[in-house]
Image: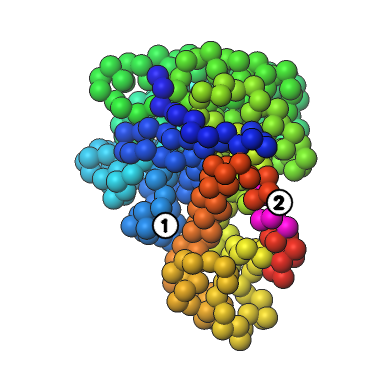
Amino acid sequence: MDIFTAVHADTGSNARTGILRLPHGPVSTPVFMPVGTAATVKAIETASLADIGFEIALSNTYHLYLRPGMDVIAAAGGLHRFMNWKRNILTDSGGFQVFSLAPMRKIHENGVEFRSHIDGSKHFFSAEDAVSIQAALGSDIQMQLDVCTAWGVSRTEAEEALRITDRWLVSAREAWLAQTERGYPGFLFPIVQGNFFPDLRRKSAETASASGLPGIAIGGLSVGEEEAVFLDFLASTASLLPREKPRYVMGIGTPEYILAAIGEGIDMFDCVLPTRAARNGLVFSSRGAFNIKRAVHRLETGPLDENCLCKVCREYSRAYLRHLFKNGEILFSMLATYHNLFFLHRLVRGAREAIAENRFLSYRKEFLETYHGGENHP
């Protein structure tokens, strides 16, 4: 079940380039995936995502199941047609969303019972349900249902969460194989959990690797831990995973974390951060992220980033964008979102080029020195 080809390994780090072969076309890795939780990446059209160059985007099983509902998406002919996105889609199983609803959910041996955040109605997801829903969506990559635990939980709680996650993996794999026999072309990834206990992480990585599934995701990171802890467990977990499988770290979106992940041989990552930050006035630039609402930008006729070639930086000034933001204009969210996603796509594309030339470490060093030392960095 080989969907990944490693193209080039950087000689100075664990970074690598590769190609993912998915039902809606190949994906060059490393790759940042924009998050379209409810069948839309907020404040940007799918045509603009394609224009930037994205080959894969995310959506979320939990949210789509609740609203608009599977009958609506089925009537549209699947999620790709529903959201007018002709490229690949990865869907999260909903495990993290259920985790975030702790007061409203109850975990059982065979699934999770939860209340809708929309209307309080009761629902139940089994591992098999999560697979069948994602197959009905037409996901190119789907994730197993898992139990995510927060930073600081006890070992006992972490062990129990991992035991259930492993149990659900067996059920999910069987359900996915049954779906493939019916013609479903998408792929299932297991998720490594284990909280911040090295032996549990190792056990989970071994279980995920032994599943024979076509890729592996690393979950349960960036859940409240300090940066040093994140980096330590990112590196140690990545080192446990087979090189022939694509590796996906869930939920990271800062330039620092993205570059750290690439340096550890991670192929895929996603986060709502760049789009959420954009809507709140925080924009990325090569000289540091900054908030557009600051008065210093009121008379600034230059672009958001003098080194950026996106259409926003070519056509609009900081002063104009600040004006839009201060007046609550929808156009600001659209333009800032485009720019932030363009910025991260360009960052990752530059990393791919650097890896191909065996200079990833110098690329990362130079980028971060400018980013942290620039005039915009706090």
Q: Kindly indicate whether the residue at mark 2 contacts the one at mark 1 (C-beta within 8 angstroms).
A: no
Q: Is residue 346 visible?
A: yes
Farthest residue, direction bottom = 299
Residue 151 part of the magenta segment: no
Q: Position of residue 228 (x, y in %)?
A: 78, 40
Where does the C terminus fall, quadrant-wise?
bottom right
Q: Is residue 16 above or below residue 362?
A: above
Q: Of callouts 1 and 2, which one flags the residue occurring earlier in the amino acid sequence?
A: 1
Instruction: Indicate the quadrant containing the N terminus: top left, top right, bottom left or bottom right.
Output: top left
Whether residue 99 is visible, yes or no, is: no
The total of numbered circles placed on residues is 2
Residue 368 falls inside the magenta stretch: yes
- Disc 1 to disc 2, how far (Cα)? 25 Å
Determine the residue positioned at 45% across, 23% down: 214
Residue 24: give x, y in percent of width and height.
31, 38
Rendering quarter of residue 233: top right
In this picture, is 244 found above or below 13? above
Q: Which residues are magenta?
A: 364-369
Q: Which residue is mark 2?
A: 365
The quadrant in which residue 133 appears is top left
**Could you say where residue 166 lies in the image, as x and y percent from the top left?**
56, 16
Q: Which residue is mark 1?
A: 52
Between 10 and 312, the residue placed more toward the observer is: 10
Q: Identify the residue at image location x=36%, y=54%.
A: 50
